[in-house]
């Protein structure tokens, strides 16, 4: 029997863990390196929709995720003074399908994926790839912790600011498509007593939101604002970032002064620009990218997690179907490109429905929202389901359990 092929996945996020699962099931020896000391479970709740719902069903974690479905009651939109503009069903805004699509805590999804693989996959936490050399018959990897190993393949699943991508293809600016907004995400006390709901305040070019998941004592807070050019210098310096947000929202009403204070005190503030990653190729030689590292669609589409799940599945499928990695990577790109393109096209520069940048666009958006109040919930957006999944990689079953028959591990 030949030894299993060895693969290193950089990043234990959604795409890395999902890929680890499917590759292990088809016979690979999988190592995952994660630069954080443990799974990163923070963040706003995330959506799993359309094609990605089928991926998690095939992994056997759909029931667990359904138990954790957030099922928010409403989204309330406010004007500059905090007066109500409209209160609508979350599905009407996001284009989800009741009873099919899921909204779960990011931490719940990551924990469910990790539970599938933790006993079968090698995890190296608190470490990362310092350098790799793909020139030989494998990829020689030097880790920051000092160890050196050789893998048949390496996959970068290390998020929108992927280090793997930078090492392989060059600086992020080449592939980053700025969408005209910056944002700060943090948690703060639930002083308004919100429960299973989102409240969003808007003025032209500015948005503030509080999102209560369940009846928790804390809410997720978001401050987002329009900038024609990315404030790159400010983003690099934590104090400058705080200062920029405070300046932009200095005259704002509603709960925003309290939000600015909470941002200053927050333990977990996350600042970034809103953008997409668009690349002509997702692999080079024995190294490939998956998820946000290759094709982040931005949180404005709500599709980052769904693309990551579908991408991990199709990449594993291609590697199971093609012994030659070059053919596998090419097949994967062929299968996934269109799906990525239609989902990235859901948003355009400065044109996010939730964050109108002009008074006219805001009024139009509000008119639309008032109309939604009286309409039935939206149906699914075709982009969410625009990919038909191939059957699970050989050697696996729909429930995620492994047939011990011939599969890729049996070396066809
Ligand atoms: C902490 C956190 C909070 C998030 N919050 C939100 C949110 O509120 N809303 C939203 O829409 N999306 C959020 N996202 C992004 C969202 O999870 C992704 O868009 C989506 O799930 C696709 O996942 P991914 O696995 O491709 O990337 P990610 O989920 O970003 O996972 C990448 C993983 O790689 C790790 N990593 C990064 N660099 C290295 C490195 N050099 N070496 C090893 N590991 C590395 C990261 O720590 C992370 O665990 C968040 C991501 C993270 C990590």
Image (tube, rainbow, N blue to C red):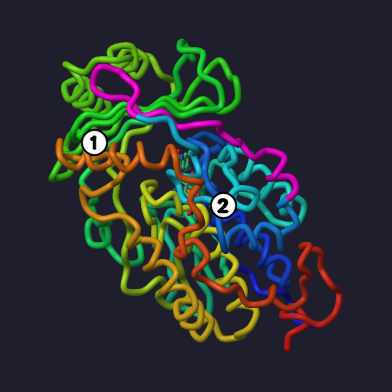
Q: Locate the N terminus and report the quarter of the image it occupies.
A: bottom right
Res. 133 image quadrant: bottom left
- Determine whether label 2 and label 1 are within 8 Å by CB: no
Residue at left offset 20%, top offset 46%: 180
x, y (%) of residue 220? 46, 26
Residue on which the image places disc 2: 97
Q: CA separation, marks 2 and 1? A: 36 Å
x, y (%) of residue 175? 27, 61
x, y (%) of residue 308? 51, 58
Q: Which mark is residue 101?
A: none
User: Front-most of 87 and 196?
Assistant: 87
Residue at left offset 73%, top offset 78%: 394
Residue on which the image places disc 1: 235
Provide the secondary structure element on which disc 2 rests: loop
Q: Which residues are magenta?
A: 63-85
Residue at left offset 73%, top offset 67%: 25
Provide the secondary structure element on which disc 1 rests: helix
Q: Is residue 219 visible?
A: yes
User: Front-most of 379 and 275?
Assistant: 379
- Furthest-front residue in this view: 374
Vertical comparison of 309 with 236: above or below: below
User: Front-most of 14 and 198?
Assistant: 198
Q: Residues within 10 Å of mark 2 (few under 14, many from 20)?
A: some
Judged left or right of residue 350, residue 345 is: right
Residue at left offset 49%, top offset 15%: 190
């Amino acid at each position: 029997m030949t030894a299993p092929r060895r693969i290193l996945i950089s990043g234990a996020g959604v795409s890395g863990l999902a890929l680890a699962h499917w590759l292990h099931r088809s016979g690979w020896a999988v190592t995952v390196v994660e630069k954080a000391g443990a799974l990163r479970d923070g963040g706003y709740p995330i959506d799993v929709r359309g094609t990605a719902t089928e991926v998690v069903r095939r992994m056997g974690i759909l029931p667990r995720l359904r138990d954790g479905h957030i099922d928010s009651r409403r989204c309330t939109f406010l004007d500059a003074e905090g007066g109500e503009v409209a209160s609508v069903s979350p599905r009407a805004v996001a284009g989800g399908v009741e009873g099919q699509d899921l909204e779960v805590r990011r931490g719940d999804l990551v924990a469910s994926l990790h539970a599938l693989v933790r006993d079968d996959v090698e995890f190296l936490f608190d470490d990362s790839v310092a350098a790799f050399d793909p020139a030989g018959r494998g990829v020689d990897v030097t880790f920051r912790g000092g160890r050196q190993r050789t893998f048949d393949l390496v996959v970068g699943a290390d998020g929108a600011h992927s280090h793997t991508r930078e090492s392989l293809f060059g600086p992020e600016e080449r592939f980053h498509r700025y969408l005209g907004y910056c944002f700060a995400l943090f948690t703060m006390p639930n002083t308004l007593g919100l429960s299973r709901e989102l409240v969003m305040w808007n003025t032209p070019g500015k948005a503030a939101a509080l999102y209560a998941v369940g009846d928790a004592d804390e809410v997720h807070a978001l401050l987002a604002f329009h900038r024609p050019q990315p404030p790159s210098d400010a983003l690099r310096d934590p104090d400058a970032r705080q200062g920029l947000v405070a300046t932009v929202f200095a005259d704002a009403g509603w709960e925003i002064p309290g939000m600015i204070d909470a941002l200053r005190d927050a333990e977990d503030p996350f600042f970034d620009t809103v953008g997409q990653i668009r690349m002509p190729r997702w692999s080079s030689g024995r190294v490939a990218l998956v998820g946000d590292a290759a094709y982040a669609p931005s949180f404005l589409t709500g599709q980052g997690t769904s693309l990551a799940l579908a991408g991990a599945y199709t990449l594993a499928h291609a590697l199971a179907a093609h012994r030659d990695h070059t053919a596998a990577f090419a097949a994967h790109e062929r299968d996934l490109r269109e799906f990525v393109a239609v989902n990235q096209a859901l948003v355009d520069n400065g044109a996010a429905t939730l964050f109108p940048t002009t008074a006219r666009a805001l009024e139009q958006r509000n008119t639309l929202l008032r109309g939604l109040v009286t309409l039935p919930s939206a149906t699914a957006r075709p982009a969410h389901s625009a990919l038909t999944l191939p059957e699970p990689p050989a050697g696996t079953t729909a429930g995620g359990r492994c047939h011990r028959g011939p599969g890729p591990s049996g070396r066809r």
